[in-house]
Amino acid sequence: MQFKMVCPSPLGDMLLASDGAALTGLWFVGQAYCGAGLPADAADAPELPVFELAQAWLESYFAGEMPKVCSGAPAGPGPRPPASELLRLELLGTPFQRMVWETLQLIPYGETTTYGKLAQSIKERRGTPTSARAVGAAVGRNPVSLIVPCHRVTGADGSLTGYAGGLWRKRALLALERRGITVGEEQRPSSELVSRLLDIWEGSVRATHAFLAEADIQRLRGMVPQAIAEVPHLLVARRGGAPVGFAGTDGAFLEMLFVADDARGSGVGRLLLERATELLGVTELSVNEQNPQAIGFYEHMGFVTYRRTDTDTQGDPFPLLYMKRADAWGSRGVRGWGVVSP
């Protein structure tokens, strides 16, 4: 008998599979090969102990920790056994695939290897040559994401290639492991968090909005806390637990995105924008025409300008450029479409 369940994660829902005793599958819903080998009659069993262990592992991992133990360990005194002894994996594949997947588990947390180096390791284990292409095919069919860390394999030049869950997820996972950067949605931001995000906003604005006078900054500062608290979806990026950036979305529109001045250039902005576009469905945004750095960033991320206004949304003389994802031009509901000529 095969069992399944779906659980949420910061990078999207995940499908878990089990034979009742071991974890046999863990995929991001919608990724390539999602549910491969899982029979159509697999029973939903969210109460299965192995699923509870897997969810504990995921919760710990996405909190920026290196999961070593999971909830559900035997009670009593003494150290708890490592997760590998609690959360048993059953990797179903060919002998070659299983060897590749076992080798993936030897890549240390926060480190990466290449397909070529992985192929060399497999050659040493098998005693016969193998190609990076064959290894890459096996890596792509990894049935247990994250726990079997196929996201730690890169191209020969270090480029992020070949991740079944999407390169944006691979980028987020490596940022989590290498730099301790997490991105999560805040349902009810506390007043303390809003205050810290306000400081990030001001530092970012002072570094990038040279066209604003001091009086403009102080006036806008009084409006920002309410905007942060009331935005429908608020994403907060943290490094080592401390906020370093945030983004707010309303439907398909990016209402705000700001990165702490000391975190600029570390990929925080990209992580926030990719989370907003890939999980929250953002396809549109507006940006001050006098902020060329931001315009260049959004263009690099695939946004193109479709209209311009002479003033901002408060009627002040700061022109706005409205931008839309180039791959979403055919969709409906473009905010303000045709109201102002480009």
Image: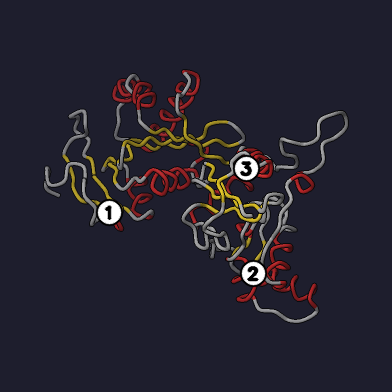
Badge 3: how crowded within 10 Å, few (<14), some, or many (20+)?
A: many
In this orientation, does residue 206 appear?
yes
Q: How many marks?
A: 3
Residue name at image x 26 percent, y 43 percent: 289
In this orientation, does residue 260 appear?
no
Element under disc 2: helix
**Chain-order first, disc 1 or disc 2:** 2
Q: Nearer the viewer, mark 2 or mark 3?
A: 3
Circle 2 is placed at which residue position?
115
Residue 264, image x, y percentages = 49, 42
Badge 2: how crowded within 10 Å, few (<14), some, or many (20+)?
A: many
Badge 3 amino acid: Leu
- The quarter of the picture where residue 102 lies is bottom right
Badge 1: how crowded within 10 Å, few (<14), some, or many (20+)?
A: many
Circle 1 is placed at which residue position?
304
Residue 31, image x, y percentages = 49, 58
